[in-house]
Amino acid sequence: MARDAVSVAIDFASVSKTLNEQGLETLLLESRVSDRSEYLRRPDLGRRLSDTSRQRLQEIPTSKPADLVIAVSDGLSALASSHGVELVTKLQPRLKSNGWCMAPIMLVRFGRVAIQDEIGELVGASLSLILLGERPGLGSPDSLGAYFVYGPRAGRTDAERNCVSNIRPEGLSPELASETLYFLLTQSRTRKLSGVSLKDDRQLPMKEELRSISGSKVIESGQSDFL
């Protein structure tokens, strides 16, 4: 299952159709990676957009800067993409209803975490969030990671990112993940920061007990072996 998770590709056309049916605008992008094999061998190419995708973003008409741009990528587990779609459909309406200006959903083929910096900078967003499959293993081939950074731009470090990890039905459900991300993103926009200085300090009943049961975790700074 872990091997399949790494090798299987996302059907981005299907993902786009699902999101469009929810009234969400999407835009298909790609990194500098040409195929799955190169994606696994050259992480550096997965952190940059192709020239065509850069131009596509620069041509997006904007009436005002976006508060947030959300990207969905395959990462190291295409099996996690369904959780990403569910998470987007739960999170975006909540943000928009609270006055957030949203950019189109970016569907990024062969993207790594740091590609969110270039995407966010090109669209002029205050925050950039990327959802992508985590490295499969330990019986979790479909785990999704959600990384965000305030003030996205080239050169952002891992310590400037926050990550909500292990998003899947047997871990942190997309519903609970959307609540966690909404809180953290709101705090990030208000305080104008992200990373090690931003904590999930909500007073939730039985928070630690729930985590111990579900095996879910919130990583305060972006520590990942597939960045």
Image (tube, helix red, strand yellow):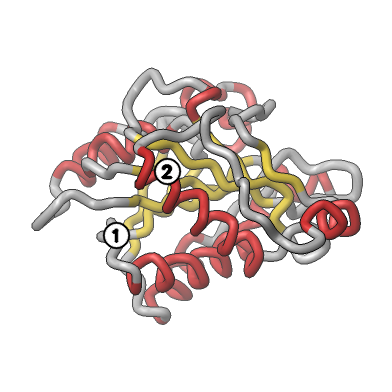
Question: Mark 2 or 1 closer to N-term?
Answer: 1
Which residue is pictured at 59% across the width and 31% down the height? 222
Residue 168 location (% of width, % of height): 73, 60
- Left or right, residue 223 beside residue 90: right
Label tally: 2
Task: Give the residue at mark 1.
Answer: 102
Task: Give the residue at mark 2.
Answer: 188
Q: Quadrant of residue 80?
A: bottom right
Are there few (<14), some (14-19), or many (20+) residues within 10 Å of tag 2? many
Disc 2 is placed on an element classified as helix
Residue 27 location (% of width, % of height): 32, 57
Which residue is pictured at 66% across the width and 65% down the height? 176
Q: Nearer the viewer, residue 56 or 146?
A: 146
Disc 1 is placed on an element classified as loop
Q: Quadrant of the C terminus?
A: top right
Q: Amino acid at mark 1?
A: Met
Residue 48 location (% of width, % of height): 39, 28
